[in-house]
Amino acid sequence: MLKISRYQDISLIENEAKKDYVDRHSPFVHCKTSAKAGEKFEIKVRMGKDYEHPDDFDHYISNISIFDKDKKLAEATFYAGALGGQGKKGHQEVTFYVLLEKDATITAQSYCTKHGLWESDPIKVSVS
Amino acid sequence: MLKISRYQDISLIENEAKKDYVDRHSPFVHCKTSAKAGEKFEIKVRMGKDYEHPDDFDHYISNISIFDKDKKLAEATFYAGALGGQGKKGHQEVTFYVLLEKDATITAQSYCTKHGLWESDPIKVSVS
Amino acid sequence: MLKISRYQDISLIENEAKKDYVDRHSPFVHCKTSAKAGEKFEIKVRMGKDYEHPDDFDHYISNISIFDKDKKLAEATFYAGALGGQGKKGHQEVTFYVLLEKDATITAQSYCTKHGLWESDPIKVSVS
Amino acid sequence: MLKISRYQDISLIENEAKKDYVDRHSPFVHCKTSAKAGEKFEIKVRMGKDYEHPDDFDHYISNISIFDKDKKLAEATFYAGALGGQGKKGHQEVTFYVLLEKDATITAQSYCTKHGLWESDPIKVSVS
């Protein structure tokens, strides 16, 4: 079974290297929790809150996708070097725009070329 | 948590519609179980064994990816209509070629635009 | 040779249907024309200025990518229905964030599942 | 305008480094020139005929797509290292399977992370 890692509350992790590892690999969904049906709705996904991920050729975030429940809405593919390249770090992020017609549950998935698939906590969006 | 469906032995499923549903959505990895280090190695992924999936605009297999353990090796993106379009069915398939340097565990993941993510059984490949 | 369509000034096009066709299929790059080296730089791409593109299963904008000169920085893949689905129209858009180290020329390319590849005018960004 | 490079007959190129450069970056479509309507049709795309492309983290073939005229049929995304990694070279290739309903013109496009977009000669396929 493919391993899919998930965010853990890093305030509960004592080891600094592990805090960094978990935080920088976790995609976080940033969006409002309510939307108007049929209106443009912004969904930003940003990797990490407190720690930045390297943008090295052999170690970078290559994909971020968003789902409403199990339905994929969009996916971004990144190329190494776009966040500054070797020696640089950054929070990879992307902003998508969708129209929601009914209540949604938005989850993001990301892929690190060294540390595999990661999944965000879901965000519930009520649509009226 | 994103739902990822997995193949179940359809000979144990009595309901014909469910056999069809499970089989046509499951990616199957077809490759040898041994490889020579550093030589081209063929990995075919084919959707379904006994049942074909529709290729309708609103319901088709849009992605097939392969992993060695948790590392993505390649991904194919398909467009609706490439297998004949509305009213047609087929086993979507793709053949990738990789070089393996050490023992590998190949898993395929696919995405159906109506029924989400599916994952194959893993195939172990011994490399010498 | 694959056809790649480009924006033409629609104020010079008399035929209303053609104005609509050209505008709704053209990706436009929205970003500042100067950037600070090594700082996060926002690049939005939005399809169309005056006319919206359908989001139908058999006719939608499936990809938007950005390049600095000939180097691809990122690509977004969209799925039919994310802008409201059949009968709806919208300006598909996505916002990427990159770090630039030297003067850049940003071009966007998009793909419509019925009308093929389109390319934006390039935007020059001076980096200091 | 994004530069898209095309194959030139390398027997007419005298400089060895340029022969190598052009050949290893060119996608070649390998398929039959006739097909039966509605039957599975194999389309292989392979980079280079005589020269192999590096599979380095900072220099690899990341994408191969196929088109029928201007319509994209499928695209493969590769990850650095899948052909053996740093110091190794190989002909990246992928085999797609489509159904054609009428005469087709198959063109491949590829992307090298250092040398941009390349396009194959088109192959005409008569369908009966």
Image (tube, coloured by chain):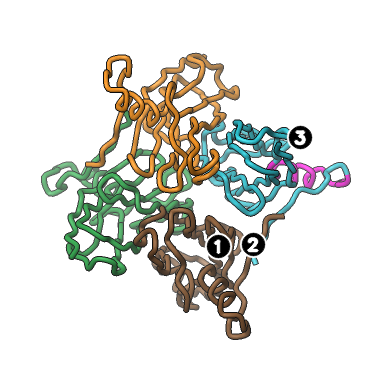
Chain colours: A cyan, B brown, C orange, D green
Q: Secondary structure at mark 1?
A: strand
Dot 2 lies on which element? strand
Picture coordinates of residue D19, whole percent (x, y): 21, 46
* Residue lying at 54% horizontally and 69% vertically, measured from the top left: B26
Residue at image mark 3? A50
Give the residue number, with chain letter if any, for mark 2: B4
The reply to whether the magenta stretch includes residue A14 is yes
Front position among marks 1 and 3:
1
Do we see residue B74 in this rendering? no
Locate residue C37, reporting x and y percent: 55, 20
C20 shown above or below D114: above
Whole-number angstrom distance, CA of label 1 to CA of label 2:
9 Å
Which mark is drawn over residue D54?
none
Q: Main secondary structure of the magenta part?
A: helix
Marks 1 & 2 on one chain: yes
Q: Amino acid at mark 3?
A: Asp
> What residue sits right under mark 1 in the picture?
B109
Give SS at disc 3: loop
Q: Chain of mark 2?
A: B
Q: Do labels 1 and 2 touch, CB within 8 Å?
A: yes
Q: Please name whichever residue, D33 or A27, is drawn nearer the observer in this view of the structure.
A: D33
Tell which tag, 1 or 2, sits nearer the viewer. Answer: 2
In percent of width and height, residue C52 lies at 45, 29
Q: Identify which residue, D50 or C26, lies in the foreground.
A: C26
- Where on the picture, by quarter, is residue C9? top left
What's drawn in magenta, residue-wise?
A12-27
**Is residue C92 a member of the stretch shown in magenta?**
no
